[in-house]
Amino acid sequence: VSQSAYHMHSNEEVFPNPQSFSPERWLNNPKGPDGTRALSNYLVSFSRGSRACIGLILAYLELYVALATLFRRFDLELFETTRDDVDFALDIVVPMPKKDTKGVRMVVKGCID
């Protein structure tokens, strides 16, 4: 038995407007669709329970540090990137992009010291 993180995170009953960037959905201890459990219980990026990824805390730490450093040091702008370039073509265990995608491309507009 398996579960797709992409399909869980795209479920509109759990995450209204799942494709929109809305970090405010996590403010004020939000509840899931049943109204009792925390919304964070439905976040399954690294699985849940006894089968959860053993490196979950390290992965989050690396993401926070890398992204904070990137956005603090550089003024970035998207370059010739469309929604089609980042949508998944296949998601079984690991989401896979389309074979002909260019991915997310950025232009460094400046460096912030």
Image (spheres, grey):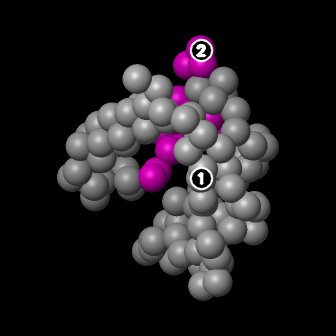
Whether residue 35 is visible, yes or no, is: no
Q: Is residue 29 magenta?
A: yes
Q: Position of residue 93 (x, y in %)?
A: 45, 73
Quarter occupied by residue 36? top right
6 sits left or right of 80 in the view: left
The quadrant of the rendering that contains the N terminus is bottom left
Q: Residue at x 70, y 33 (%)?
A: 22
Quarter occupied by residue 82? bottom right
Decide: few, some or many residues near mark 1? Use Cα within 10 Å; few <14, some 14-19, many ≥20: few
Q: Residue at x 73, y 49 (%)?
A: 19
Magenta span: 27-45
Nearer-N-terminus badge (2/1): 2
Residue that label 1 marks: 106
Element at label 2: loop
The quadrant of the rendering that contains the C terminus is top left
Q: Vertical placement of 36 versus 104: above or below?
A: above
Q: Position of residue 92 (x, y in %)?
A: 51, 77
The dominant secondary structure in magenta is: loop
